[in-house]
Amino acid sequence: MADLFLKQAEIYRKSRPSYPRKLFDFIASKTASHDVVWDVATGSGQAATSLASIYESVIGTDTSKNQLEYAPKLPNVRYECTSPNISMSELEEKIGTESSVDLVTVAQALHWFDHDTFYNRVKWVLKKPNGVIAAWCYTLPKVDDEFDSVVRKFYADSKPYTALVVGLVDDKYSNIKFPFDPVDGCADTGPFEFEIKQVMSLGELFTYIRSWSSYQTAKDKGVELLSDRVMEEFRNAWKEVENGERIVMFPVYLRIGKVGDAVIETSPVMQPLLGLDR
């Protein structure tokens, strides 16, 4: 699956929406200290860039060198390309020793992971007992009722090319396994809702759709999901304004928890950490 994004790293970087500051401020308010963050499946650094303005050191990892080449270079961000099956020794070498990380973040990628193995690594590397893991996803873009109806129909038509695990995103991460304690001030681990608001042209929205894994899967099978007919349906619903741009809203759903006094079962190999998306 990682190969899907090797083919479209530049499109991914250009088209993906920026996460809201409120999201990062909320996460930061729940971490006891702001020293080290491990941003897993960092891709082209969308989350790492924002985290770098709050935390002393950010380590962004991904299995795709291609994606990392497009990540912004910042003085307190270190990018590491990890093997698909990361060993304990590689984890310690590239991320940190046991109980050394304040925060682990996963933006729009947790649904692709082997959860049991990944969480075991998270519990090993997070500071005890207050180290925090924050994982979020965002769902389909919204503009208005007419346009949203076209988006939903298009998404339904893309389902034959969509991986089953993306259903966890459709469920707003409400059903994803998340074995952590609520952070201080919260009764549960979420999902907590935020929103991205981004001014976009229709062309930029088409570019965003082309960054979907389902679009790439269909293309590899000789199917063009954004056919002339489909693009015309989008254009008719877009309702062109003077400059061709509209405000697009992406709902964001956050799961957040702290490690507590975790019992850790170490094994030499972790299953693939795939920096993938819808």
Image: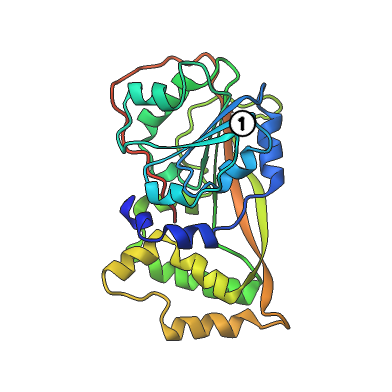
Is the residue marked by circle 1 packed among few (<14), some (14-19), or many (20+) residues within 10 Å?
A: some
Query: Which residue has dot 1 on it?
Result: 188
Q: Which one is in front, 128 or 88?
A: 88
Residue at the image position 52 percent from the left and 83 percent from the top: 233
- Left or right: 165 as drawn, with respect to 29: left
Query: Residue at point 64% right, 43% down?
Result: 50
Image location (x, y in percent) of residue 192: 63, 42
Q: Amino acid at mark 1?
A: Asp
- Please state if 107 lies on the left or on the right of 52 as rendered: left
User: Number of numbered discs present?
Assistant: 1
Q: Closest to the observer: 277 or 261? A: 277
Residue visible at 48% across and 32% down in the picture: 178
Q: Is residue 115 above or below residue 157?
A: above
Quadrant that contains the C terminus = bottom left
| Image spot of residue 17 (x, y percent) | 59, 57
| Left or right placement of residue 28 versus residue 59 in this view | right
Residue farthest along the left direction in this orientation:
221
Q: Does 178 sit above or below residue 216?
A: above
Residue at left offset 65%, top offset 55%: 196
Report x, y in % for residue 199: 68, 66
Where residue 155 sits in the image (x, y, percent)? Answer: 45, 67
